[in-house]
Amino acid sequence: MRFLLDDEQREFARTLDDMLGSAGTPGVVRSWAAGDHGPGRALWARLAEAGVFALAVAQEHEGLGPLPVELAVAFAELGRHAVPGPLAETAAASALLGRLGGDAAHAWLPQFASGKAMASLCVLSPGGGPYALDADAADAVFVVDGDTVRLAASHGPVQSSADPTRRLARPLGGAVLGQGPEVTAAATYATDVAALVTAAQALGLGRSLLERTVRYVRQRTQFGVTVGSFQAVKHRLADTLIALEFAQPLVHAAALALAADDPAAGREVAAAKVSACEAAYGAARTALQLHGAVGYTEELDLSLWIRKARPLRNAWGTPAACRARVLADGPVG
Amino acid sequence: MDLDFTAGEDTFRAQARDWLDARVPSVPLPSLETAEGFAAHREWEGTLFADRWSVVSWPEEFGGRGSSLLEWLIFEEEYYRAGAPGRVSQNGIHLLAPTLFEHGTDEQRARVLPSMASGEVIWAQAWSEPEAGSDLASLRSTAVRTEGGWRISGQKTWSSRAAFADRAFGLFRGDPDADRPHQGLTYLMFPLDADGVTVQPIGRLDGKPAFAELFLDDVFVPDEDVIGEPGQGWRVAMSTSDNERGLTLRSPGRFTAAADRLTALWHSSTDPDSTAALTSGSGYGSFSHDPALRDRVADAVIGARAYQLFAYAHASRIAAGGSIGAESSLNKVFWSELDIALHETALDLLGPWGELSDESTEAPADGSWAEGYTFSLAGPIYAGTNEIQRDIIAERLLGLPKGRR
């Protein structure tokens, strides 16, 4: 057993972190939220060049995957830098089409892998909402309804989210691409992939919120001392770190389980999803509280991170749904 | 990155499982915090030792198997899965022994370790004093130089297992002129039946004498029972504090096994047939359909899995030549809170049976949930309170400035 990222995986994370760190993501995020997808698409192309989207696509469709561990590594960095767009949805749509095969897979997967096309995905059941994320930006919106999958023809008006980069719309109409139990099975797998990468994104988001807050409380002075010297502040940050540190191995184990097609993968993914997302949401609450009033402003870039935490927590598996799933087939591990 | 066990590790697990399945007492031993239970647990340590299962991670010459950290984790998973007794010798094997391996002499290791591993000598710790708890370095007990050794005096307290143990180890102020508080401390071992030692048992929350006060009046300790250099005791003791807080004190196996039992309890309490069997016809199913309880069961299962995986990552880092320092404080807070939450959830699932003490003849699961709950309540206090651990996490892992406690 070597339950540690290998050197190549660490290097991949470092490369993405460096690239995104100098990409001015707050500006990209604000443009995306305003409906200007230009800078976001440019960043998408650079991520594709780094191989991010190819990780969810098999070699036969010009991808590198499926490589769930590397996807989790990449998505942690996307979360760390609050990258906007239908990221989890593109990975999940790639997983869906990869399992289904056929003409749609041949038509779309090479384009997803190369970053030429963005996908969105709406899984209406069980427990899914009626919206497709960033349907207005996506080149293809797939809709799973029970055992049927459609390629949507259009979408309804864009609804705003608590996270302004999450632009939600109802997919409308479209041709049926497939029907039957294989669709249900493929959708379950795709939903697991979506949940895994959302958990990884949340982990990165939470780490960034913690780092930013530690930096802030080290320089913010009140009563003549840095507020980071106060025990109430320290303990809240310590608890935030503990939650993130214990969520991380769950995310990695879930990725390994998906990679191995482990029958327990669904449980592992659910455990990772709820833990990482609760940890990230806790980090957001801590960041908001410890920045004080300035943390409650839209102007501060921190708000772009804070506002992502709550929607990610509920996307692709609410905490309650995840907890139920953990117990559905007995204990994990 | 993988979570795979080698064939050798699988064999090790199978051997441990077979041995435990054959040897673990079918009726739980009496509480180890009683005279009767202590004796029974001491005997069990001897049974473990006879087949070299009491200290698997120690070198073979001292009765171990030279097991890796990962093998030790596997052993612990099997140990608690089998429902084996609590370890009455754990203060010695997880606190004193690592110190002896790192700072002791060959003579000390040869003299102390085999009888510790067999349960012949049970060790208690003598750290805290009435005025030195979290602020351990303010301790006042003294060690005064004398011909061939030291004479120790003072008062130690919260000494776990000391009510029935044979020997103790702890820190004493050997150099009254040294700059306080961390300087001039000496790490000593001494017998609890020596002249000048008075052991006064203390009842824990449920009255069982789980710890004791030690009154020391001019007790002679020979030089051969000093560990490390006199005056260097703080450094010597701190080298084991990470062990105490970390994995070895409360291994993930305890929690994965307890989470499995909790899940079984939850399933059985939602199933009228097995509920009847559990409670002789009365049933406690009506208390467990609450989704809030289901969520708490799930969180205990997830927490135990998270700790298990965290430990696998930890073992992988050690195997790759890394080390663990202040990260052990993350463990301490995590497992101690998990332990309480897990037992609280079990007691809530038991509804009206949840308040029965472990001594009640009608307590579910032979009182193990009640006993485990009482035991868990001490977790956030001992081995450095969780407040101290959070300070360590904030200062040493997050780089926040030291401030007033």
Image (cartoon, rainbow, N blue to C red):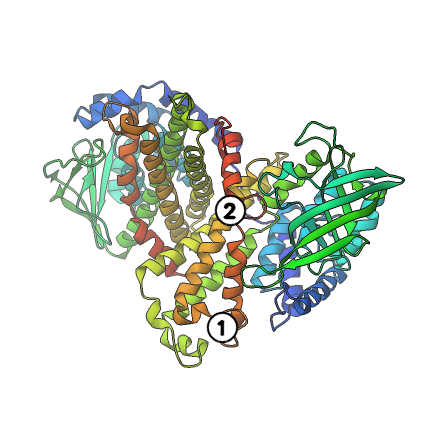
Residue B341 horizontal side relative to residue B141, left or right: left
Element class at badge 1: loop
Query: As drawn, which residue projects farthest toward the bottom?
Result: B281
Query: How many circles with numbers are drawn on the protein?
Result: 2
Q: Identify which residue, B224 or B346, lies in the foreground.
A: B224
Q: Quadrant of the N terminus of chain A?
A: top right
Rendered view: B357 above or below A29:
below
Can residue B232 be seen here?
yes
Q: Residue at x 48, y 64 (%)?
A: B261
Element class at badge 2: helix
Residue B309's tag is 2
Name the quadrant containing residue B344: bottom left
The chain letter under disc 1 is B
Residue under label 1, please give it: B363
Q: Position of residue B38 (x, y in %)?
A: 68, 64
Q: Are marks 1 and 2 on the same chain?
A: yes
Rendered view: A296 above or below B136:
above
The chain letter under disc 2 is B
Kind of residue at disc 2: Leu
Q: Which circle, 1 or 2, is nearer the viewer? A: 1
Q: Residues within 10 Å of mark 1 (few under 14, many from 20)?
A: some
Q: Residue at x 54, y 53 (%)?
A: B378
Q: Identify which residue, A73 or B271, lies in the foreground.
A: B271
